Image (tube, rainbow, N blue to C red):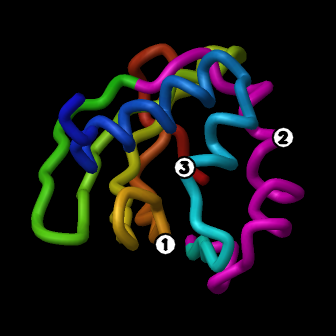
Amino acid sequence: MPARSKADSVRSLFAAYKSKEREIVEELLTDDFTFTSPYDDAIDKAAYFETCWPNSDRIQTHILERICEDGAGVFVLYKCLLNDGKEFRNTELFTFDGDRIRKIEVYFGAAYKDGAFVRQ
């Protein structure tokens, strides 16, 4: 069986958020995984699941608009639709170690509700 591409691994992570399958996300991440965003400075895997995973309950779906794989990295531009009708777009850089995700860096975009810009 051919190895899964890094882009497919990223798609699997987003699908696991939608289906609320934490065990899939855990398997996709390395033991020394870190997560960085405007709110989080290179937090470890345990802190990621404590801080970020609960947000999966708020997420209706992700629409992956662009995925660009380059060497050990994958850039993703996506729209996130929340259960309360809000939506936002982010870009994330996934860095891999072998076939698992070692690091995610998030860059926030604008937020919207009912098609109108919402000031944060």
**Residue with the mark numbered 2:** 54
Using the rendered view, name the quadrant where residue 51 is placed: bottom right
Q: Nearer the viewer, residue 49 or 102?
A: 102
Is 64 left, or right, of 105 in this rendering? left
Q: Residue at x 65, y 16 (%)?
A: 19
**Residue with the mark numbered 1:** 103
Which dot marks residue 113? Answer: none
Can you tell which of label 3 and label 2 is closer to the viewer?
Answer: 3
Which of pointers 3 and 2 lies earlier in the amino acid sequence? 3
Label 3 – label 2 distance at C-alpha: 18 Å
Which of pointers 2 and 1 lies earlier in the amino acid sequence? 2
Is 69 left, or right, of 29 in this rendering? left
User: Three-letter amino acid code at disc 3?
Assistant: Leu
Which of pointers 1 and 3 lies earlier in the amino acid sequence? 3
User: Three-letter amino acid code at disc 1?
Assistant: Lys
> Does dot 2 land on a helix, a strand or a loop?
helix
Residue segment shown in magenta: 37-62
Q: Residue at x 44, y 31 (%)?
A: 12
Assess whether residue 40 is covered by the magenta stretch: yes
Where is residue 65? Give x, y as percent: 22, 31
Can you tell which of label 1 and label 3 is closer to the viewer?
Answer: 3
> Does dot 3 land on a helix, a strand or a loop?
helix
Marks 2,1: beta carbons within 8 A: no
Is 73 left, or right, of 20 in this rendering? left
Where is residue 13? Give x, y as percent: 50, 38
Where is residue 96? Give x, y as percent: 36, 68
Using the rendered view, name the quadrant where residue 99 is placed: bottom left
Assess whether residue 19 is covered by the magenta stretch: no
